[in-house]
Image (cartoon, rainbow, N blue to C red):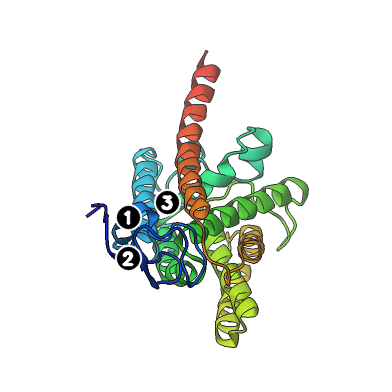
Amino acid sequence: MFRRQTSGAVVCTSCGQLVGVDDATCYNCGRRNPGLWGFAPALRSLGHDLGFVTFVTGACVVVYVLTLLASPGQIRFGGLFSFLSPSGEALLAFGASGAAPVFVLDRWWTVLSAGWLHGGLLHIFFNMYWIRQLAAPVAEMYGPGRMIVIYTISGVVGFAATSVAGRFLPDIPLLGGASITVGASAPIFGLLGALVYYGRRSGSGMVHSQAMSLALIMFLFGVVMPSVDNWAHAGGFVGGYVAGRYFDPLKAERIDHLLAAVICLMLSVLSVLASLAHWWWLLNSSAG
């Protein structure tokens, strides 16, 4: 599957045009080393998103199951949206974010880890559905590496926004942030923000209107539904829009964007591990 092609033509990983496997620059889009040292065909076999949707889905499901296993006797079954909910302690241990973890426990890295945790069966189901729907078009328009970076930045901005709001605007209806929060909805709104900017930058009114309409519908749904983190949604949307503008979808994706994507995924995994290690240290410190 990951055999290196050493001769002939390959498809440019940015624009899809045929280039020589050893070409220094794509004649169509200007991308440097479009053949990725002969590994471009192997990477393209993973799909336009380089397997990101599969990775996120698998990782989120694994973490969700682990949080359930870490909630013996405390799993909630009542209510449609709280069915099969892990305990708050388990979510904190694995990296929940919000005002309490960030400002009280000084767990600032949880703005990275919280997007990989979920508070119930329907919560993870709907988030994985929307990732599957939105990641592919964003990867098509920006490139898979930049899509992953946009996804990560959006989650960080969204959870930072709700943590700050939860610290300085507590208990204010519709304006108060979250004390504890989890879920992939912040980066999902970031993908929508990137699509909105793409529509504006490229002149595609259809993409702009559809993405904006979907974002408004989802945001209004969050306003009327209880226990929805609207600050994370709004922050994620802004983060995705700004990141999309910075990357400029009309410019070709570069190799360093793919490297940045790998770093983002590594930092996300490390943030969950850091949360578990820190929680273990807290428990042992209090016991001592």
Closer to the N terminus: mark 1 or mark 2?
2
Q: Residue at x 63, y 61 (%)?
A: 243
Residue of label 1: 38
**Dot 1: within a 10 Å radius of its alpha carbon, few (fewer than 14), some, or many (20 or more) residues?**
many
Give the answer, above or below, for where 6 lies relative to 285: below
* Label annotation for residue 85: 3
Label 1 to label 2: alpha-carbon separation = 8 Å
Amino acid carrying label 1: it is Gly
Q: Check residue 224 in the rendering and tell me which mark sits there, or answer none.
A: none
Label 2: element kind:
strand
Q: How many labels, in total? A: 3
Q: Nearer the viewer, mark 2 or mark 3?
A: 2
Separation of disc 1 and disc 3 at Cα? 46 Å
Mark 3 residue type:
Ser
Q: Is residue 284 left or right of residue 229?
A: left
For disc 2, the marked residue is 10
Position of 41 relative to 207 (above/below): above
Look at the numbered discs 1 and 2 and tell me whether their residues touch, using CB distance below 8 Å. yes
